[in-house]
């Protein structure tokens, strides 16, 4: 019998590699032969597939992104590991999605992966996050609603008598989200000054560098080089 610590380490490492599979990037290459990192927000995400590749393609991309985080969490429980290990495995898949090994660590934002982890550990968390993202999509500003869903998730889990691990899991999800928004696939910040501070705040709360959301997500490669 393989010791639990060995199974845990192997599962977390494998989870990162599974999470690193850049679904949105591959679909954009297969369907339109474009590098999604040069379009719109520059994230390798379902939202950019919707905007720049094909709207129907967001369905398989989204399902795969949910599944590649749900699978490691599910495997952890099937291997009789603790629920904390299942959460760690799911978060490793999220880290792989956000900083994928196969794309030199330039990835997406991990929201679909977050919902995949929740689907296994706290299933009610899936519709909770989905509802906030749907509201954000309807009002044309999903980024702040994603933060609200994560901040309020522990309270919702407590009200629904969910597992105690949801609170630290939500905290880790929030930190990963803010770190990825700020790092922004290594997109350079303006020189120190008021504009730099404005960009940092926009990244953290609105997940973009400029005021206009439509202009940001519709950018083309020549506009990206000028930004």
Image (spheres, rainbow, N blue to C red):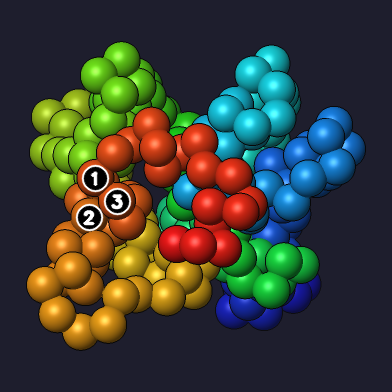
Residue 16 location, quadrant: bottom right
Q: Are marks 2 and 3 in contact (CB under 8 Å)?
A: yes
Q: Is 36 situated above or below 201? A: above
Pick the front one: 172 or 121: 172
Disc 1 packing (10 Å; few <14; some 14–19; many ≥20) = few
Q: Are marks 2 and 1 in contact (CB under 8 Å)?
A: yes
Residue, disc 3:
210
- In this view, the mark in front (2 or 1): 1
- Identify the residue shown where x is 30% and y is 24%: 140
- Identify the residue shown where x is 23% and y is 66%: 200
Q: Cα distance, mark 2 to mark 1?
A: 8 Å
Pick the front one: 222 or 136: 222
Secondary-structure class at tag 3: loop
Q: Earlier in the sequence, mark 2 or mark 3?
A: 2
- Identify the residue shown where x is 70% and y is 30%: 53
Q: Cα distance, mark 1 to mark 3?
A: 4 Å
Residue, disc 2:
202
Picture disc at residue 113 = none
Residue, disc 1:
211
Q: Are marks 1 and 3 in contact (CB under 8 Å)?
A: yes
Q: Residue 220, percent across and down? A: 59, 45
Q: Residue 145, percent across and down? A: 23, 34
- Identify the residue shown where x is 72% and y is 66%: 103
Q: Earlier in the sequence, mark 2 or mark 1?
A: 2
Q: Is 118 situated above or below 197? A: above
Task: Report the side of 96 relative to 101 (left or right).
Answer: left
Residue 24 location, quadrant: top right
Q: Cα distance, mark 2 to mark 3?
A: 7 Å
């Amino acid at each position: 019998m393989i010791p639990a610590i060995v199974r845990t380490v192997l599962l977390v490492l494998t989870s990162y590699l599974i999470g690193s599979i850049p679904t949105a990037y591959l679909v954009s290459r297969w369907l339109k032969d474009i590098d999604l990192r040069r379009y719109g927000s520059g994230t390798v995400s379902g939202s950019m597939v919707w905007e720049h590749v094909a709207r129907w393609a967001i369905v398989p991309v989204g399902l795969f992104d949910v599944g590649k985080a749900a699978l490691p969490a599910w495997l952890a429980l099937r291997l009789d590991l603790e629920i904390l290990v299942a959460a760690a495995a799911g978060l490793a898949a999220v880290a792989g999605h956000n900083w994928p090994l196969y794309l030199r660590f330039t990835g997406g934002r991990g929201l679909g992966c977050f919902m995949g982890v929740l689907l296994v550990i706290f299933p009610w968390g899936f519709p909770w996050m989905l509802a906030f993202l749907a509201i954000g999509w309807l009002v044309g500003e999903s980024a702040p609603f994603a933060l609200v869903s994560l901040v309020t998730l522990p309270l919702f889990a407590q009200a629904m008598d969910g597992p105690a691990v949801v609170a630290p899991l939500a905290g880790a999800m929030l930190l990963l989200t803010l770190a990825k928004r700020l790092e922004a696939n290594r997109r350079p910040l303006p020189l120190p000054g008021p504009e730099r501070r404005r960009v940092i705040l926009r990244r953290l709360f609105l997940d973009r560098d400029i005021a206009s959301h439509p202009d940001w997500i519709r950018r083309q490669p020549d506009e990206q080089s000028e930004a």
